[in-house]
Image: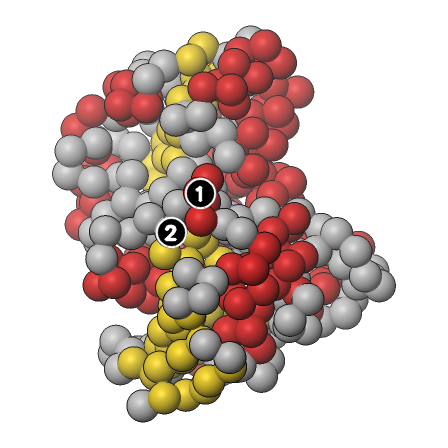
Amino acid sequence: MDFAQKDRMKVVEREPSDGHERLLHATDQGTGLNALISIHSTARGPAAGGCRMFPYGSIDEAITDVERLSRGMTYKNAAADLPLGGGKSVIIGRPDRDKTPVLMRAFGDFVNALEGTYYTAEDVGISPHELAYAAERSDFVVGLKGGPFASGDPSPFTAQGVFNAMTVTWAHLTGIPNLSGVTVAVQGLGHVGMHLARRLHEVGADLIVSDLNSERVREAQTEFAAIAVAPSEIFVQQADIFAPCAMGAAINAETVPRLKVRAVVGAANNQLASDDMGQALKDRGILYAPDYVVNGGGIVNVAMEILQVTDARFRDERLAGLRESLDHILREAAATGGLPHHIADTYIEERLRFP
């Protein structure tokens, strides 16, 4: 059915997958907007999750991605003990060609149509600069640079959370509570990947990097003395930790046999292409740190804007809580022989039952 109509925009309610609350599809011929919003859960509060722009091959591919991402946000927000549910949005298109101010304003109209049941922020292909155009049309756009509760770019805080998780994971493997001299293969040097590389370089880690953007690769080589490899070769590097910081499903049947690392700890969402990849990693002696516990730092920062909190202790306490949660999960995995991502799911689902 038609859910809303604004100017030339048409928003249609689609049937969501099992376990999801809502799925909406917006099209606007005048601006070129073709976007989806998935709300997985509002049990703990309004849904929150970023907007991704990507040239999906089909609407079905986009739906699969947005629903996987929105479910992940429910778990991520619960892992960080935030009073927020899980949602996500995607814009179908090429960020380098189709991302215009008028398109982003139309996306703001789309977000606004949900009347505060969903808050959006930046994700792959979208920056706070573009979000400012969407915010002209909606009060439910966050991660902005200006305003009384503006939280700004969440990427540095996502990167800090990943860095914290790497430190915890390495300590579980070796008993050494720092990353000096550790070799990390970073896949993807976007907003988060570059901040993570900088943080790792500061503590004396050695970096191997890959990205489709050659300018970012050169920057990492110059600033961090990183070794650059082709994107297809990042999976075969001899390293201590593999950090997937690009798109999801990097851990799949093709890549797992090629990995030469002791742990996987990264910023990407939905890193496991399928549930059995967790067992595949364990069979190869590779410790997996569950992604939605690792990469929750950014949403913690954004939550301060949503909840209108200015005390930095809110962020610091929840970043520490994510670190403690990962430590608990890895300890239980070691004690029981269980898979870390299964233990994480059980741990967080208990929290979801008692919001």
**Residue drawn at 51 percent across, 20 percent down:** 215
Q: Residues within 10 Å of mark 1 (few under 14, many from 20)?
A: few
**Residue farthest front in this picture:** 30
Nearest the camera: 226 or 13?
Answer: 13
Q: Which mark is residue 97?
A: 1
Above or below 43: residue 295: above
Q: Residues within 10 Å of mark 2 (few under 14, many from 20)?
A: many
Residue 258 in view (yes/no): yes
Locate residue 118, reporting x and y percent.
53, 75
The residue that label 2 is drawn on is 93
Q: What is the CA distance from the residue labelled 2 to the residue labelled 1?
A: 8 Å
**Residue drawn at 51 percent across, 60 percent down:** 103
Q: Are marks 2 and 1 in contact (CB under 8 Å)?
A: yes
Locate residue 88, reporting x and y percent.
45, 65
Above or below 354: residue 294: above
Q: Secondary structure at mark 1?
A: helix
Q: Which mark is residue 298?
A: none
Q: Which quarter of the figure has residue 84?
A: bottom right
Above or below 141: residue 282: above
Q: Colour scheme used in the picture?
A: secondary structure
**Residue drawn at 62 percent across, 14 percent down:** 223
**Residue drawn at 46 percent across, 85 percent down:** 5
Nearest the camera: 8 or 37?
Answer: 8
Q: Which quarter of the figure has residue 209?
A: top left
Residue 345 in view (yes/no): no
Q: Amino acid at mark 1?
A: Arg
Q: Is residue 322 left or right of residue 345?
A: right
Q: Secondary structure at mark 2?
A: loop
Locate residue 330, reporting x and y percent.
42, 46
Question: From the viewer's perspective, is the residue at label 2 or at label 1 nearer?
Answer: 1
Q: Amino acid at mark 2?
A: Gly
Q: Is residue 223 left or right of residue 73?
A: right
